[in-house]
Image (cartoon, rainbow, N blue to C red):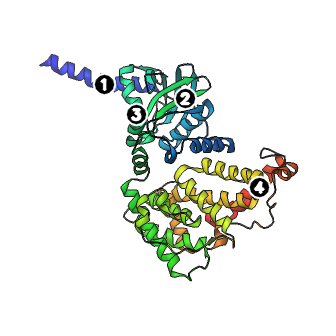
Amino acid sequence: MSILRTTLLVLLLALPLAIAAVAWAVLSDRPAVDRPVAFTPAHVERAREILRRHDPRWLPVGVPRTIGLAAEDVDLALNYLADRHAGASARVVLRAGTAVLTATLPVPPNPLGRFLDVTMVLREGATLPVVESMRLGRLPVPARLARPVFDEALRRLVTPEGYRVAVEAVRKVAIADRGLAVTYVWQEGLASRLRAELVPAAEQARLRAHHERLAAIVGAGPRGRPIGLDALLGPLLGFAAQRSEAGDAVAENRAALLVAAFYANGRGLQVLVPAARGWRPSAARAVTLAGREDLAKHFAVSAAIAAHAGVPLSDAIGLYKELEDSRNGSGFAFDDLVADRAGTRFGELAAGDRASAAELQRRVAAGLGGADLLPPVDDLPGPMPKDAFERLFGGVDSPAYRGVMDDVERRIAALPLYR
């Protein structure tokens, strides 16, 4: 009996020491990867071109196709997903046949370290890459244990159904120094499955509730008369606040902003939710901000993107749109960028976390006007074609351009709603 007691005592004493030893081996005070997510207009343009060439609506069924992804874009996408889903930083280095993934995750406060570094080496497989080795900090992990960890991480990043669709569609992922070549075969029904995963049933119900509220708002005013974006967002955020009492303020705000963005741009939600064709129709009214429809569109879309996908992507899309307009459209316009940046800030507050979401609802409930959403823009340099923009500002990296954008940021920061 004494031997048993002694053994149990040793085990009880050894277990905490073993746990501490493992924690010491895997945790550190210095992150292996610490980098912001930084999109540029060039990234947006490349993504847009890939989506254009591989639009599911026009893909032939059963025909192999290949997507080429540059190493820079793969690295950016991994870092973005790590940041959005885990508050982590990540990096991927591609070599012929292999990819080295490194991610740093923050951990709760403890005396042994603030960060967990994960390094994983993947090699080409018959279809998807397979795990060759893995380390948690300085601790090696057997490949047989690492592989299910990698599969679970993929499911969390792209959702379980998205992972299943990828497994069914992808035929080969070839890894080279310059990027990835993903060969896939589109199959009947995959588009509807992905759409259902993108907007699950609970989110569809939430969007329908906000759509019904929007239909009531626009239907209460004179038919055909413009409505201010503030007159739309105020009641929608008030409705979101009511639903948040028994729900999630972030999710409610996101739904409200998405519904407002689609309406302001004259688009129906059936693009995302086919069932929306059967929802209550909304009276057609132009949505304005500072008396202009274009500013309302810029604000509403940027707010929805920031709330759903984050600030860096929203900023890059806004700048890309202005550069594209300077080449082929109405011209580069700083007032549009102000609306983009203000909308991004609004979306950031609406969905940053539950406290921020609830605080924005409270501020909006106190009263909302167009001047609360957007600072004065009439004195900013007006729309200009590409050659005029480059002659006056030299480009988006020039001191002259940065000076105007610094002024833009000061104007937005001065509005009480965004403090």
Seen from the viewer's position, the closer of residues 6 and 84 is 84
Of badges 1 and 3, nearer the viewer stands 3
Q: Residue at x 58, y 33 (%)?
A: 69
Q: Which numbered disc flags the more N-terminal residue, 1 or 4? A: 1
Between the C-alphas of marks 1 and 3, the distance is 40 Å
Q: Residue at x 39, y 30 (%)?
A: 149
For the residues bearing labels 4 and 3, Cβ distance under 8 angstroms: no
Which picture quadrant has residue 274? bottom left
Is 167 rendered above or below residue 367? above
Query: Mark 4 or mark 2: which comes first in sequence?
Result: 2
Q: Position of residue 317 (x, y in %)?
A: 64, 50
Q: CA distance from mark 4 to mark 2?
A: 35 Å
Find the residue positioned furthest to the top. 3
Which amino acid does the dot numbered 3 rest on? Answer: Val
Q: Is residue 57 left or right of residue 44?
A: left
Of callouts 1 and 3, the N-terminal one:
1
Query: How many other residues sit within 10 Å of disc 2, few (<14), some (14-19) or many (≥20)?
Result: some
CA gap, disc 1 and disc 4: 64 Å
| Type of amino acid under label 2 | Ala
Decide which of tag 3 and tag 2 comes sooner along the chain: 3
Give the labeled residue for mark 2: 181
Identify residue for label 4. 332
Near-viewer residue (62 or 82): 62
Q: Amino acid at mark 4?
A: Phe
Question: Upstream in the sequence, badge 4 or badge 3?
Answer: 3
Secondary structure category for the residue under label 2: strand
Q: Position of residue 7 (x, y in %)?
A: 21, 19
Label placed on residue 15: 1
Along the line of sight, the residue nearer the viewer: 140 or 278 = 278
Task: Say few, some or many: other residues with alpha carbon within 10 Å of mark 1 (under 14 / 14 to 19 / 20 or more).
Answer: few
Residue that mark 3 sits on: 167
